[in-house]
Image (cartoon, rainbow, N blue to C red):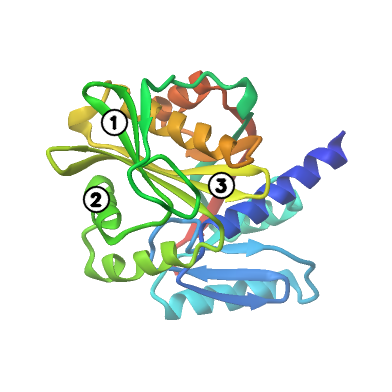
Amino acid sequence: MQENRNQEIKYMEEMSLNAWPSYRAEFYDGWLLRYSHNYTYRTNSVEQIGESTIPLGEKIAYCEEIYRELRCPANFKIQPLLDPGFDRMLEDRGYAIRHRTDVMTMDIRDSALMEPAGKEYLFDNRLNLPTLVHFREDLTVQLKAFVTEEWMQGLFSLNGTSDPTLRRIVPKMYAAIPKKTIVASVEIDGRMVASGLGIRDRDWVGIYAIYVSPSCWNRGYARAVCSTLLREAECLGARRAYLQVTSENRRARRLYESLGFSDFYTYWFRSRRT
């Protein structure tokens, strides 16, 4: 049973790397050093993806020097498959826990999704997705099969990304996603007020980029976006779903639990300014 669980965690970690490419990456003796100008911990951290042959102290020092040159904190991702001694080693070196994240999963067949009132297919696309999914008169989810510049600008407005460098490189990171995507949005008077992204990887779909403008909270927008992504991914062959949410984000966790997601494992980052 533990072996099966470990194998599934390994699979989830692989899918996460597929779903969220970094702007720059370096392989180093079984470790992957990722850097994206501090845009998310996941794409600015060290991940262990293979066996090590170099002493750990030497490897940590090397990573610290690389990130120092990049003017970025040295962040190390800690997930359940790692030797617990590595986490303790970082703690002894002054690394603090940052950004604790829960990975949640579910079988889509067991989900509790919102039922749409209707769909419209206005444009052809490579996934044969509906263009509009209507839930009620004032709530329609728009879908596309690829990330557009318009969607990216709406996402930046929702998540508060204003740094010119990030606004330049992050679209390239999204464009580098090697898997099929389902891109969702809700608009009011031409302004995007909710977003979501589904990323297909074999028989799974990952749910990413769920944002809702604070002015539109408690209107069911996030539930409608998630329901649409999950339902359309299932139509395309997905059977299971996963997402990642920070442990302290109780509002989001309540939504995801109500949809049918449950905790699978937790990872965190150890970080120290150098």
Quadrant assignment for the N terminus = top right
Q: Quadrant of residue 54?
A: bottom right
Residue type (three-letter) at the residue carrying disc 3: Trp
Quadrant assignment for the C terminus = bottom left
On the image, numbered disc 2 is attached to which residue? 154
- Residue 179 lies, with reference to residue 121, above or below; the image says below
Q: Where is residue 240 in the image (x, y as percent from the top left)?
A: 64, 35
On the image, numbered disc 3 is attached to which residue? 268
Judge depth for marks 2 and 3 and give the one in front: 2
Characterize the local packing of mark 3: few (<14), some (14-19) or many (20 or more) Cα atoms within 10 angstroms: many
Classify mark 2: helix, strand or loop: helix
Between 51 and 252, the residue placed more toward the observer is: 252
Name the residue at 73% across, 50% down. Answer: 10
Name the residue at 59% across, 53% down. Answer: 16
Measure the C-alpha gap from mark 1 to mark 2: 16 Å
Residue type (three-letter) at the residue carrying disc 1: Thr
Q: Position of residue 141 (x, y in %)?
A: 33, 35
On the image, numbered disc 1 is attached to which residue? 140
Between 266 and 107, the residue placed more toward the observer is: 107
Q: Which of the two labelled residues, at mark 1 and mark 2, occupies the earlier sequence position?
A: 1
- Can see residue 103? no
Query: Which residue of the protein is positioned furthest toward the left in this rendering?
Result: 189
Name the residue at 51% across, 22% down. Answer: 259
